[in-house]
Image (spheres, grey):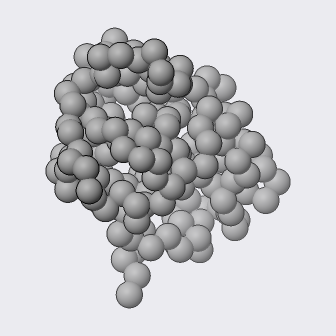
Amino acid sequence: MEEIVVYHGRPENVEERLSKEVAVYDLLDRLGICYDRIDHEAIFTIEGCNNIDGVLGIHLCKNIFLCNSQKTKFYLLLMPGEKRFVTKDFCKQIVSPRLSFAPAEFMEEYLDITPGSVSVMGLMNDKEHHVQLVIDQDVLKEKYIGFHPCINTSSMRIAMKDLLEKFLPAVEHEYMTVDLPWQE
């Protein structure tokens, strides 16, 4: 297996990168947020991120994009990667009827992200605030948070404090918290 290199900051050459990925770097740089990143093969599941966790020294979190049955309310849930998602527990805490995974077209329309690349960074594209961010308490306890820069061929880490105090205010999104139980 090839050694994974950790880079500090944006790629030197962004010509072959997607514009939505470059937009993430541009925004983080403009906000003065320091970040480390790695490039890798496309990863589509949290299980595929196991090697990345160790390289970046973090626990990557699950990013789950959900909606109600009418497709009028959308949620982006950040929760520990090793915690099992149970819909009824989540719905009970946010006081919502049953939710399901949102169709890809809404993910692309509101966050400019495709399946497998869901990331909190997509909120920068949600100018009309269609998506409510929800963060599990266990994620908030971490010093760093890891995510994809809107494309699943790179992963990054930033300080949780920077996400909460710089990024979210800049993209004008607030978050709700939940305390999802660990399942046996």
- Looking at the figure, which quarter contains the N terminus? bottom left
Give left or right: position of 141 versus 74.
left
Residue 139 horizontal/vertical position (percent): 31, 55
Taking 25 as reference, is 67 above or below it? below
Closer to us: 66 or 54: 54
Q: State the image coordinates of residue 32 (x, y, percent, origin top left).
A: 25, 16
Residue 114, relative to residue 88: is it above or below?
A: above
Determine the residue positioned at 70% across, 47% down: 104
Residue 94 appears anywhere in the view = yes
Q: Is residue 159 above or below residue 183?
A: above
Q: Specify the quadrant that holds the C terminus.
A: bottom left
Residue 40, by quadrant, is: top left
In terms of image quadrants, where is residue 136? bottom left
Identify the residue at image location x=72%, y=42%. 106
Residue at the farthest right position? 70
The residue sitting at 30% across, 21% down in the picture is 10
Residue 166 percent coordinates (x, y):
32, 25
Q: Image point 47% across, 21% down: which residue?
A: 16
Looking at this view, name the residue that lies furthest to the front.
1
| 34 relative position to 146: left or right | left
The spot of residue 24 in percent (x, y) is 43, 24
Count of marks overlaid on the render: 0
In this orientation, does residue 174 appear? no
Decide if residue 133 is on the left or right side of residue 83: right
Among the 4 quarters of the image, the one containing residue 53 = bottom left
- What is the residue that sits farthest to the bottom in this orientation? 184
